[in-house]
Image (cartoon, grey):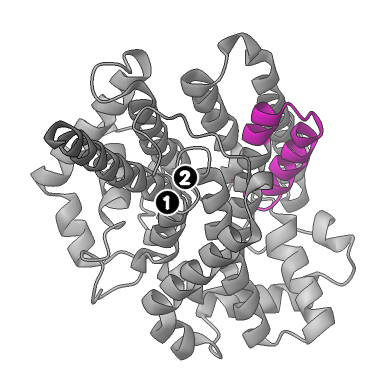
Amino acid sequence: MKALNADIKTDPAQIGWHHILIALLIITASMLLSHSSNIINNFSQFQWEDRLFFCHNQTTIHLLWDCFTKPSLWPGLYRPLTTNCYYFFGRLLFENTIEVYHSINLLFYLINALLLFFISLRFLPPYWATLPAVLFASRFAHVEVIQNTVEFQSLLSVCFSMLGILFFIHGRLSHRKLLYVFSSISLMLALFSKETAVVVPLILALYCWLFDNRKEWKLYLIPFVISIIWLLLFITLFRGVSGYQPTGFKYLFSVSEVFYNYKFHLVDFSNIVTLNMDNIVAPEKVILYAKSGVASALFILLFVLSCFAMHSPNWILRAGAVQKISFAFLFFIIATAPFAVLYGRLYMRYSYFGHAGLALFLSIIIFEIFSYLELSMSKRKFMDN
C-alpha cells in the first residue's frame, strides 16, 4: 500500500494487463451478483418505452441521413446517436432482436465501470482503483439502466463523458497533445448521445482547480468551447429538426426542491435503502429517507466540507486526500445537476452518472482509513522495536 503522503498519478498505459483483467472480472462479478435476477427476468422482455422507440424508428428512420435530420421520439431533443442510430442499425444488423440490445447495454454498463477504474487510477493505487468501479456497477438504483434499452442514451453519453475526462486528465499527466483531441471528440460524441454531457467541462475545471497548475487554465477552455458551440447549434439548428417544439421539461427555481432532489440521488446510492424496492423508478423508502433530517445533515456536511477543502485543503488529513475526497463529492454534485433541477422527474435512473462520483468518494475515504491504520500500526511496531 502507498505511504500516506504519496501522490498517486498512475497512467493507464503503465497498468499491466493482469490489473485490467482482474478489475474486469471483479466488476463483472459484482454486476452479476447485484443484477443477475433482473437481467435474467428482463433479457427477452420489451419495456413499454422500448416499444415506442422501435415503432418510431420503423416508421420514421429509413436512411442513415434520417438519423440526423428526422426528429427523435421525444420532441425538442437532439440525440441522434442514441435515439435514432442505435435503433436504425439494430434494425438493419439484427432485426430488432431485443436480446442483442440488452447484451449491448450490459456491455456498455461494464465498459463504463471499467472507465471509472481507469479514472480512479489518478486517485488510488491500481488494486484499490477497482473498488469505485465495483461500487458503481453494483448499485440497485441502476435497475432501469440495466433493463431498458432506451437507457442506452445514458450509457453511451456517460461512456463518452468518462472517456473525455480520462483522455484529458492523462493528457495533462503525460503531456501528450493527441489525448486532448481524443477528449474533444469524446465530448462531442457524448453531447450527441445526451445533452446532459454538457457538465463535463465543469468536472474538468474542478480537476484543474484542485490538482493541476492553474497557469495552464487555457487548456481547460477547450471543452467549454466545444460545449458552447454545441449549445448554440442546439438552439439554432438541432432543435429545428423537431420544429423547435418544447422539450416538455420543466425546471425548478426553488432551492429547497433542488436540495431534496440531490438528497434523493444521494440516498439511492445505498443498496440497503434500495433493497426490495416497491418501485424501480422512485421507491417509497428512498423518498422517505431523502425527506429525513439525517439525509439533510449528511448532504450539507459533505457539501460544506468539499467546498471548504477547495480553498483550505490542509486543515485535516493530508492535503492530497482532502482534495481527492472533495473532487469526488463535487463530481457527484456536477454530474447530477442537470437532473436535480428538473420538476416532477425524480427518477433513480438519473442518479447513474453522479453515482460514479459517489463511488469514487466512498472508495477514497476507505483507502485513506486503511492507509492511516497501516501507518499507525507501522509506527507502533517501530516504537516497540
User: What amino acid type should be assigned to the residue bearing mark 2?
Assistant: Pro
Q: Answer left or right for 252 relative to 173.
A: left
Location of residue 241 with respect to 311 vertically, above or below: below
| Residue nearest the observer in this picture, 58 or 228 | 228
Asked whether the residues under the numbered discs 1 and 2 touch, taking CB atoms below 8 Å apart as contact, a structural biologist would say yes
| Quadrant holding the C terminus | top left
Mark 2, secondary structure of its residue: loop
Give the quadrant of residue 302: top left
Residue 319 point in image, percent of width and height: 35, 21
The residue pinned by badge 2 equals 125
Is 279 part of what is drawn in magenta?
Answer: no
Q: Where is the N terminus found, in terms of image quarters? A: top left
Three-letter residue code for mark 1: Trp
- Would you place residue 214 above or below residue 345 in this image? above
Residue at numbered disc 1: 128
| Viewer-closest of 139 and 340 | 139
359 on left or right of 103: left
Which mark is drawn over residue 239? none
Q: Which residues are magenta?
A: 168-195
Query: Label 2: how many residues lie within 10 Å, few (<14), some (14-19) or many (20+)?
Result: some
> Is residue 151 visible in the rendered structure shown here?
no
Total marks in image: 2
Residue found farthest to the left: 293
Q: Is 175 part of what is drawn in magenta?
A: yes
At a point 64% along the width and 85% down the height, the residue shown is 98
Q: Residue at x 61, y 39 (%)?
A: 165
